[in-house]
Amino acid sequence: MVQSKKQRYLFLAFCILPTFILFAIFTLYPLFSGLYYSFFDWSGSSNVKTFIGLDNYKKLFTDSIIPKTIIHDYFLVVTKVIGIMAMALFFAVALTQLKIKEAPFYRIVFFFPNIMSVVVIGILWTFIYNPNLGLVNSGLEFFGLENLARPWLGDEKWALPSIVLPAIWAGIGLFMLMLMGGIANVDKSFYEAAEIDGASEWQQFWKITVPLIWPQIKIAVLYIVITTLNGSFILVQVMTKGGPNNATHVMGSYLYQQAFVQFHFGYGATIGVMILVLSLITVFILQIFMRREKVEY
């Protein structure tokens, strides 16, 4: 009996070890390396590293660009969560509850942006926003609204909102499929009973669909928040590089600029630590606010 237990534990350890090694190499090592480098003044390409203690963290709290990047990141978080979840829920319900013959085709169409590289999406939408040849301004001129045309990515007021649209467009398909999977598992008898009781489709949506797919909604929201705080810099870097006049800098793009453009690698690592801390705090708060008891009918 003791021998079989030992063999079982050895087997489990053998199964877990490869995954843990990959996790340690690609997650734990970069994490602790970034924390280590945040205490140094280092260019990233020199052998000379000067220990400066908490000076990088002091600089973090006095850097006038940092508050802007945090505001920009959370602006993207809020707009993406609202935009993606609203559209994904709408299409998920429409393609599962309504009898649409072309539903398989629409699933492919909506999911298509998810198989595209973020870089490709950024380049595509940069052309769409082009002030002279872009689809947006051309469309406005076609409908006689040329007074609304502007250099979208070059306007400090509109540059960041302009990045939101491609970010939402690229994310709808994945979460639509996730929610469709949840809706497909809801027993149809619930809707039939609600319809007999006189509940409208809107009431069925809020009283049956949303509570029963809440775990999928929660996972989707958390995923959007985490990927936005940690990955939105790619779209920003491709489309605006943080401009104009720092109007679109997010924490990740500012980290990239400090570490790999201005060669303040230690300070860049400090910004990375800040991103990690803010991400953990945000996810913790969301976990509390989105906590619900499991619904069973």
Image (cartoon, rainbow, N blue to C red):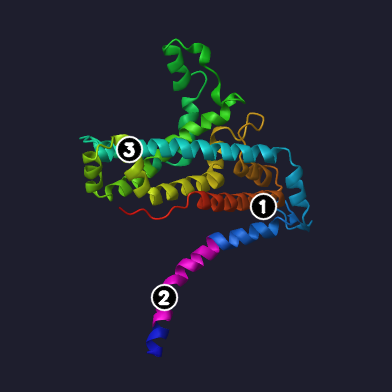
Does the stretch in magenta take in 13? yes
Q: Amino acid at mark 1?
A: Ala
Q: Position of residue 257 (x, y in %)?
A: 65, 42
Relative horizontal placement of residue 221, taking residue 264 as reference (left or right) = left
Single out the mark in the foreground, 1 or 3.
3
Contact, CB < 8 Å: mark 1 with mark 3?
A: no
Tell me where the magenta segment starts and ends, as one range. 8-26
Q: Position of residue 53 (x, y in %)?
A: 78, 57
Q: Position of residue 15 (x, y in %)?
A: 41, 72
- Residue at point 44%, 71% (across, down): 16
> What residue did someone put label 3 on?
203
Q: Amino acid at mark 3?
A: Gln
> What residue did someone put label 1 on?
269
> What residue did someone put label 2 on?
12
Give me the C-alpha separation between circle 3 and circle 2.
47 Å
Task: Tell me if residue 187 comes above or below residue 103 in the rendering.
Answer: below
In what element is the residue under mark 1? helix
Does the stretch in magenta take in 162? no
For the N terminus, the image quarter is bottom left
* Tag count: 3
Single out the mark in the foreground, 1 or 2.
2
In what element is the residue under mark 3? helix
- Residue at point 44%, 42% (across, down): 117
